[in-house]
């Protein structure tokens, strides 16, 4: 299927690994020009190399920005011109008891997970509306609705993205601009692979057995009972970013393997 993304200019925050990198790679395969983002030149260089290994003709560049630093974000926005598609993907989290999650932890997660999307959208949405075409996709999480007890702060930030998405979508009325959110489920990113390997070593098992145990005992509500691949999540994002998804606006799209439930 031709997603009609050729020559579209895309910026993806937090895109040197995981879902962000997979999304960047697939956008280049569709002929889009992609700007990736990381916290260092080294990680950006490595990510670009990975993308070009899969697609030698990829139109890809990168900009360093630390989303905990407002000045860094402002410098980033100044460098972003004529962006057609904004993917707010960057995110951080802590896994700890509610009573042990400090104000600083809460504020860091809001700064990166929520305010990054606020600032980038504030900087880029107006131009999308002026040109009467654009896409903003906020990468939330199944945790926005599942809310694990050890990730209450993280989940709160991911729920905030759903409100932001709906509110921004209402500003696009009668235009060809859309704003949506995607809620990925448990995904086999580099971080998840490392976690499974550590657990396997600790328990003298294998990463696959640890993955099976995770869905048997923790994410029991998952219907697919496995980790999604980063490409599976990226494919959902690409479709929503494409002109083919023009009728989808203000939506929260689950890519959670059925873990959230509901109808």
Image: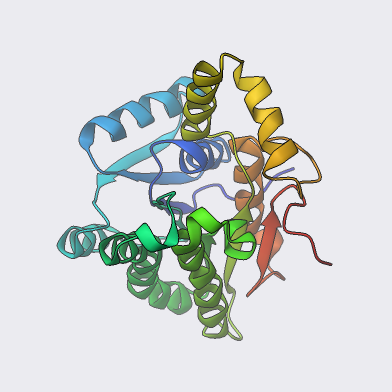
Residue 6 falls left or right of residue 62: right
Q: Visible in this render: residue 4?
A: no
Give 78 or 188, whichever is nearer the viewer: 188
The x and y percentages for residue 122 are 35, 75
Give 44 or 241, whichever is nearer the viewer: 44
- Count up the numbered dots: 0
The x and y percentages for residue 249 are 65, 73
Give 63 or 57, whichever is nearer the viewer: 63
The x and y percentages for residue 21 are 46, 38
Name the residue furthest left.
71
Residue 158 falls left or right of residue 229: left
User: What colour-coding does the image apply?
Assistant: rainbow
Q: Visible in this render: residue 45?
A: yes
Image quadrant for the N terminus?
top right
Image quadrant for the C terminus?
bottom right
Residue at point 63%, 65% (across, down):
145
Residue 132 falls left or right of residue 109: right
- The quadrant holding residue 188 is top right
């Amino acid at each position: 299927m031709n997603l009609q993304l050729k020559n579209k200019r895309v910026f993806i925050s937090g895109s040197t690994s995981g879902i962000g990198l997979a999304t960047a790679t697939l956008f280049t395969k569709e002929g889009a020009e992609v700007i990736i983002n990381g916290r260092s030149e080294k990680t950006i260089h490595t990510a670009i190399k990975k993308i070009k290994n899969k697609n030698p003709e990829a139109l890809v560049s990168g900009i360093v920005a630390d989303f905990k630093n407002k000045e860094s974000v402002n410098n980033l926005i100044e460098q972003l011109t004529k962006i057609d598609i904004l993917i707010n993907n960057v995110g951080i989290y802590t896994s700890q008891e509610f009573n042990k999650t400090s104000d600083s932890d809460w504020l860091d997660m809001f700064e990166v997970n929520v305010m990054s999307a606020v600032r980038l959208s504030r900087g880029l949405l107006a131009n999308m509306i002026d040109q009467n075409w654009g896409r903003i996709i906020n990468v939330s999480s199944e945790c926005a609705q599942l809310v694990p007890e050890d990730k209450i702060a993280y989940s709160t930030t991911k729920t905030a993205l759903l409100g932001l998405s709906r509110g921004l979508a209402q500003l696009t009325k009668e235009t060809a601009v859309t704003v949506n959110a995607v809620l990925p489920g448990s995904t086999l990113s580099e971080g998840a692979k490392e976690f499974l390997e550590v657990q396997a070593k600790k328990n003298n098992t294998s990463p696959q057995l640890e993955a099976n145990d995770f869905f048997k005992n923790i994410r029991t509500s998952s219907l697919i009972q496995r980790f999604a691949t980063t490409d599976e999540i990226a494919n959902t994002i690409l479709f929503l970013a494409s002109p083919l998804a023009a009728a989808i606006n203000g939506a929260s799209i689950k890519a959670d393997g059925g873990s959230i439930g509901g109808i």
